[in-house]
Amino acid sequence: MTRVTADVGISLDGYASGPNQSFEKPFGDGGLLDHLRKWMFDEDEAPKHAAERAKITSATAYVMGRNMFSPGRGEWDLEWKGWWGDDPPYHGPVFVLTNHAREPLTMEGGTTFHFVTDGPESALAQAKAAAGDGHVSIAGGATTLRQYLKAGAVDELRLHVVPFVLGQGENIFTGLGGAEFEAVEVSGTSVVTHVTYRRSSHLTLT
Amino acid sequence: MTRVTADVGISLDGYASGPNQSFEKPFGDGGLLDHLRKWMFDEDEAPKHAAERAKITSATAYVMGRNMFSPGRGEWDLEWKGWWGDDPPYHGPVFVLTNHAREPLTMEGGTTFHFVTDGPESALAQAKAAAGDGHVSIAGGATTLRQYLKAGAVDELRLHVVPFVLGQGENIFTGLGGAEFEAVEVSGTSVVTHVTYRRSSHLTLT
C-alpha cells in the first residue's frame, strides 16, 4: 500500500490561511505568513528545521487543489505555470484537481503537472500509481487536505503549529469532528511545534 | 511579580469541552473526556505524564470560574462543596469567581475556597497576594481562562492536546485572534502532546 502523507502549517487555533486570500496574499490576512516564515526562512531558525522542511517535498508523487497551483478560477490561463518558477520543488508528478482540462505541463527538475478532471479519488489513485516505491503527499490547500482527511485517505498528518492565534480563515479541522489520530513524533523550537499524527480510525467519505 | 500559569486539556481543534455540559457530563458530549482520561488515568500512560500532572496542582493559589466549582447557577446550594471530595487537590487558597456571595469554605488538606464577587481582576489580585513565594494557576473553565488570556494575564499556558477532533463546544481560542506566544517546552506520547507556551505580546482587556 502506498503511504499518503500531508504537511500543513497552521496557527494555534487550526487555521491554514487567513481570510481574503488573493494572488498577492496566498495566506490571506492576519499575519499567518509572517509566523510561517519564521521557521521556514529565518536565518537562525531555518537550519533547525531542515529535516522537517525536507520531508515536505520527500514524496515521489503529489496531489494538490487547483488553488494551490493557481490563483485563477474558470478556464486556464496557459501562461500560468504555478507559483514556483521553472524548477518547482516537487521533482516528480503532481496531480492537480480541476474542473478544466489541460495538457500536462512539464517543468525543469522532473516536475510534471497533470490536470485531473475526474475527482479526488481518481487523482489519488493516479498519484499512487505514479509513486513507485515512494509515497504520495497531499500538497494542499486546506480544502483539498480536509477532503482527503475526511475520506480517511491520509496515513500521516504532519502539523507545523505556529504559536499564534489567527482567529479566522480556513480551518484545517472543519467538518472532521470525530477523527482520531495518534501522535508519533513531536519536536520544535520557540517558533513552531512539529507533531506527526497517524490515523487511528477510518472515516468514511460522506 | 507573581507568575500566573494555566493548564488546559484540549482537542486537536482547541476545544476544552464539548456541547451540553451538565453535572453528569462535565466535559459535555463528543468523547473528549475519554481522550483526556487516557493520559491522566490509563495505567500504562499515566506514569509517563506524572511530571505534567503534578504541575497542574503545583501553584500556591488558584483562580477558577464558578462552573469549575459547581454545576449550579444562581444562589448557592451550601451543601455543595466542589467536585473533589473532602480533600481537594489544590492544598491552598482557591478564589472562585461568582455573582453570589458566600462565606469561605475550608476543606481538608489546606484547600480553602474563597468566593469573589467583585470580578476577575480582584480575584487574580487576591490570589497573587495569597500565593507567597509560589505562583498562581488559573484552574478553569474555558470561559474563565479565555478572559485571563485576553487580558494578557497568563504568563505560561500549558496545553495538553489530545489527538482527536471534537468539532464543537467551548473553544479555548475563541476571541483571542492576534495573541502571540512562544513555545518553550514540548513533549508527549501517542495519546497527548504537552506544549508550554509563554506569552510574547500583551493583549489589552477590551
Image: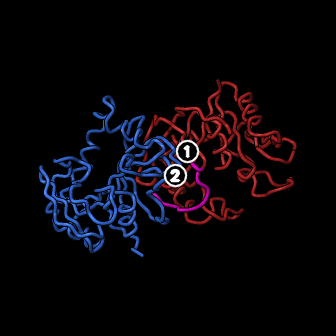
Chain colours: A blue, B red
Spatial CA span between label 2 and label 1: 8 Å
Q: Quadrant of the C terminus of chain B?
A: top right
Please give the residue where the numbered disc 1 appears in the rendered image. B177
Q: Residues within 10 Å of mark 1 (few under 14, many from 20)?
A: some
Residue B112 appears in which quarter of the rendering? Answer: top right
Image location of residue A106, percent across then percent down:
13, 57
Q: Residue at x 40, y 71 (%)?
A: A203
Query: Callout 1: helix, strand or loop?
Result: loop
- Between residues A161 and A188, which one lies in front from this camera angle? A161
In magenta, the rendered stretch is B162-174
Image location of residue A93, percent across then percent down:
17, 60
- Between residues A201 and A70, which one lies in front from this camera angle? A70
Please give the residue where the numbered disc 2 appears in the rendered image. A168
- Between residues A73 and A93, which one lies in front from this camera angle? A73
Q: Is residue B169 magenta?
A: yes
Q: Residue at x 43, y 40 (%)?
A: B186
- Same chain, marks 2 and 1? no
Image location of residue B176, percent across then percent down:
58, 44
Query: Callout 2: helix, strand or loop?
Result: loop
